Image (spheres, rainbow, N blue to C red):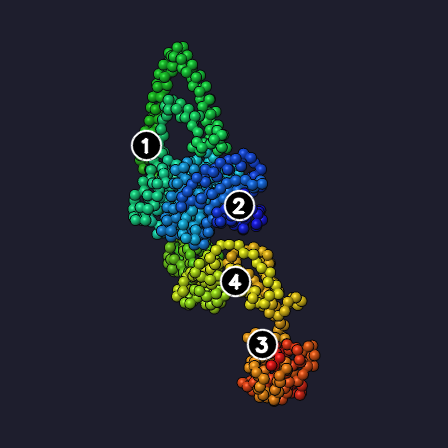
Amino acid sequence: MLNVGVIIGERYEVVGHIGSGGMADVYKAKDHKLNRFVAMKVLKAEFSADTNFIRKFQREAQAAAGLAHPNVVNVFDVGEDRGVNYIVMELVEGITLKDYISKKGKLTVKEATSIAIQVSMGLEAAHNRNIVHRDIKPQNIIISTDGKVKVTDFGIARVASSNTISTNAMGSVHYSSPEQVRGGYSDYKSDIYSLGITMYEMVTGRVPFDGDTTVAIAIKHLQDEMIPPSQYVGNLPHSLEEIILKCTQKSPDRRYSTLAELINDLKHSLIDPDGNFVNLTPLSNHAQTIMITPEEMREIQESAYKQKPRYDEDDEDGEDDEEDEIYEKPSKRRWKKAKEEEEDDDEDDEDDDDERGGVNTKLEKAMTIGGLIIGGIIICILIYLVASAAGLVGGSGKKEKKPETQQEQQVDEDNKEQVQVPDLLNKSPDEVMKELNELGLGGKRDGEEASESVAEGMICRQEPASGTMVDKNTQVKFYVSTGKAAKDVTIPSGLVGESLSVVESTLQDLNLKYKIEKELSEDVEVGKVISLDPGEGSTVPEGTEVTIVVSKGEGDTMVKIPNLVGVTKENGVQSLTDSGLIVEIEEVYKESAGVAVGEIYEILPKPGTRVESGSTVVVRVLKEKEEETQEPEEQETQTGTESGGTSGTSATTGVKASSGDWAVRNVKLTKPTNYQGGGVQLRLVQNDNGDETSGGKIVLEGDAINFDEVIGDIVGESGVETGTLYFAEKQEDGTFKTIYKYPLQFKEVQ
């Protein structure tokens, strides 16, 4: 694994890990020469040790780099740096087709056809350059955020299949053509077969051949017939099914010859879904026994010896791949053996003609006569058997009907017997299957649906209905309840442009789920919502997942988190927002935080970490203990106003600040929410001359005060700028209990 910040090839800086495969790790990297982000595939160490593997890997990658097509993930660079072998490719932001199928279950006909056309166009461009993918599967097809379909992993599949056969088979055997799993020669039509399997999975949500082991799946590709996709999708157009079946023929000769033909039929299917325009070669043409003459056999043997597979046309060193050797070597041995046998046969034929010609003629005559005699005997036996059956020989002429055995009679009775379908409603599937089997009936869970009256997990509907008389072995379909249908809610307007926290809170109140995606935006401020899916005004059931797209700013740049420990919350948040980061604030009390209340004491990720612009940063701000701060934040700082000047008499205390005094002028207090209306005592504490419970200077003491009026000037100690005014309420026992406090700022009266 490469660490973030490592620079490969003196230009590619690793900024994040995307994923891992059987043979390589994929990273997001920044190309500092061209100032763009790319995907970099780095071979794992166990493959980097094989020089022959590396040489083939680089040659194949260089061939794939020549591909430039909108439906192909372009390869930009290939190289080696300090033992790290890498391929630099186009970075595609999106989702693999496999994940898309898993998310949706199965795709619509239009979606599947559109994706198949785009994949075919990408493969056609590769085939035109004599590049065969040989590992087409949904995992190697990416759907970008703008809907573009791209094929990836060109070139790598071939190299991997020569050196890591087991790894490649484990990942691709569901989509491999019969000739690939057999270990024989594969060409462009192997890609067509794999694409057909992929189309099958898109429209049905499942692969046609599955099993417990890769060997079992491979055997099914070779021997088993594919279940037509229309068995799983009742409304599948006839033309699309014919296209899939033609792509997945076990014989390469019966598939499409080129991808251009496949693309034409796919486009035609969109116009004429139920048309019968797909030309599928009849199987009978391939099932007839064809006699091969010795001359034809000799030509086949010689061509098998001389012919090299299409892959080797680009081999510069003349070396064959492992699969090519598997294909050619038996041919060479057969050709040599055939040549030796042919020479021996020629000599034997000459000897037979010269020495034993007469013997052969007599033997042929004897065999002919013997065959006629045996044929006559067989005909006589058949005539006798027919006559005996008709009663003409050895019988009364009447053929008695063979009595049925007791077992056969019981089978006939069972087949004729009918049973009554039981009531399956409000029962569990396991209970239902047991009950049906006891009655000689079959059961099938045919789907799920909402029900207002049946609990979740129980049977809510059945076909046929209860009480219906049916033959034994009839299959009864049933549907399982998913519970009550979700209540519909409407997504309100005005959420686009709001902060992420506001939108999250709104969706939670509506009992909607949500997921967050981030996008670059030049128009929307960082942390603000760009769009919702479903959008504003949409009516959806409760529990629906809404996709929130949040702006992460104009550029996709890396930001270093500054050290803001000890900075006030407002200044810290402003600094991080200006850096293009999304800020989440947590106000927490912590012992020995090392900062004052209202200041930042921790940032996550830690200061100095480099993250992408638009990333979320958690800022933790120190707050006071709950027992010390009983009022909400918005009420704890409003203590009064300063009018200025030297005049002004206190409305309650009668205190007047004189020139040279340090005072707070014309103080008006905010009423504490926990004040019960009893007697009041105001006590000023400065310079540690008291605490919350005692000490300090009594400013006011008496009955309830009017919070709508000012209480006058509060004069403090000379030269002391700060102080705390404690608000205490008189209790039943005559003592005063502090229930609130006001921070004060003193100034010298001029």
Vertical order, 319 against 657 (above or below): above
Relative image position of residue 700 (x, y in whole percent): 63, 86
The residue that mark 1 highlights is 386
Q: CA distance from mark 3 to mark 2?
A: 55 Å
Q: CA distance from mark 4 to mark 3?
A: 27 Å
Q: Residue furthest top?
A: 355
Question: Mark 4 touching mark 2, by CB under 8 A?
Answer: no
Tag 4, which secondary structure? helix
Question: Is residue 105 among the parts visible in the rendering?
Answer: no
Q: Residue at x 46, y 28 (%)?
A: 328
The residue that mark 4 highlights is 577
User: What type is the residue that disc 1 sits on?
Assistant: Val
Vertical order, 311 against 647 (above or below): above
Question: Mark 2 touching mark 1, by CB under 8 A?
Answer: no
The residue that mark 2 highlights is 11
Vertical order, 114 against 593 (above or below): above
Q: CA distance from mark 2 to mark 1?
A: 92 Å
Tag 3, which secondary structure? loop
Return the disc, 4 or 1, that comes first in the chain's sequence: 1
Q: Residue at x 42, y 44 (%)?
A: 72
- The label nearer to you, 4 versus 1, is 4
Crowd tier of the residue under label 3, counting other residues whose Cα lies within 10 Å: few below 14, some 14–19, many 20 or above: some
Return the disc, 4 or 2, that comes first in the chain's sequence: 2
- The label nearer to you, 1 versus 3, is 3
User: What type is the residue that disc 3 sits on?
Assistant: Glu
Q: Residue at x 46, y 22 (%)?
A: 336
